Amino acid sequence: GLSGEAVELAAKTAKHPCYSFEAHQKFARMHLPVAPVCNISCNYCNRKYDCVNESRPGVTSAVLTPEEALAKFTRVKAELPQLSVVGIAGPGDALANWRAVRKSIELIKAAAPDTIFCLSTNGLMLPRYAAEIMELGIRHVTVTVNCLEPAIGASIYHHVHYQGNYYVGESAANILINNQLTGIEQLAANGVLVKVNTVMIKAINGSHIPEVVKAVKERGAALSNIMPLIPAPGSVFRHFPQTSRKEVEALRDLCQSELPQMRHCQQCRADAIGLLNEDQSYKFRDAKKELPG
Ligand code: CLF
Ligand code: SF4
């Protein structure tokens, strides 16, 4: 039979609108924009916008302190009874802002212990923080993995800041990829449901993605989310064609036999609130805090 913890996790996942297709019309998530800094540079990113790990380029979110995050959560929870998940998805990387992220989660957990917490990360700092993530009770983590080979990664990532050093090219990609795969393995081995997001940049990783999905499955990932490249203004890839829905769907069909595919992702903002297809973040913004978008 299933252990008590497995039963509890299954119950949580049934209320997670991203991990469960059935849940996405019934349960809402809110993102807390408490993570402004990033430790890598993706060529599809424009740092004026939210992290493409989990969000649509185009609109900047105001960054909140942990105390402001708790206050916003309290306000949203009171008005949005379907709220089940609090996620951290930018505008930078959740683990490059770990103190603020951890504090925000601790405050909300104390106020509302039944909240499901969710993180999205590029994975660079996963080996460093996996134990703390699990101690905090986080059981849903998304890692964006775009390739397995440093030679491909050198075309996707401009640089990586790691342990006080600055890396570019294949050495940057090599560190990132190794940490992503190690981190996924550590989380999955301890019962965390790992979702892997992959940005389909047709000319660079299009034909390589089935291998990525296979490799993350071997390390214990539970779900795959292949996302189209949205060329962000100001990003290195700004002139790239947007990957078409058809191309993404075909790749998902191909990878489905390896890992379940998420097909209802909305590429949300770092401050998204509500059902996945019904963003209500505009209702909960504090005019004083908003940056010009
Ligand atoms: Fe947010 Fe992401 Fe958690 Fe969902 S979003 S941190 S797993 S609670 Fe969901 Fe939005 Fe797609 Fe992300 S629809 S971008 S997959
Ligand atoms: Fe931008 Fe996210 Fe990549 Fe960081 S991890 S560079 S915020 S897309």
Image (spheres, helix red, strand yellow):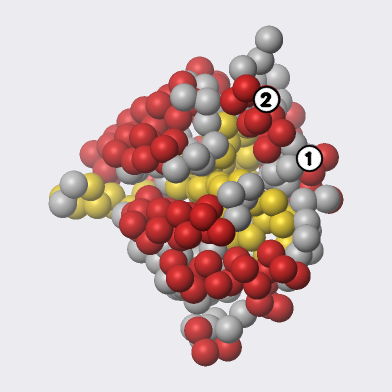
Residue that badge 1 annotates: 21
From the viewer's side, name the closer residue of 170 and 186.
Answer: 186
- Which-is-in-front pick, marks 2 and 1? 2
On the rendered structure, is 23 left or right of 110? right
- Type of amino acid under label 1: Phe
Q: Position of residue 48 (x, y in %)?
A: 45, 73
Residue that badge 2 annotates: 7
Q: Residue at x 55, y 72 (%)?
A: 71
Q: Position of residue 146 (x, y in %)?
A: 48, 39
- Type of amino acid under label 2: Val
> Does the closest atom of ligand 1 sit within 8 Å of the Cβ of label 1?
no
In the image, is residue 233 above or below residue 82?
below
On the rendered structure, is 256 left or right of 184? right
Tag 2 and tag 1, C-beta contact below 8 Å: no
Q: How many numbered marks does the figure carry? A: 2
Q: Position of residue 163 (x, y in %)?
A: 18, 47
Name the element at disc 2. Answer: helix
Q: Position of residue 253 (x, y in %)?
A: 74, 29
Q: Residue furthest bottom?
A: 288
Name the element at disc 1. Answer: loop
Say which quarter of the image contains residue 183.
Answer: top left
Q: Quadrant of the C terminus?
A: bottom right
Q: Residue at x 78, y 60 (%)?
A: 81
Q: Earlier in the sequence, mark 2 or mark 1?
A: 2
From the viewer's side, name the closer residue of 70 and 153.
Answer: 70
Residue 270 visible, this angle: no
Q: Quadrant of the N terminus?
A: top right
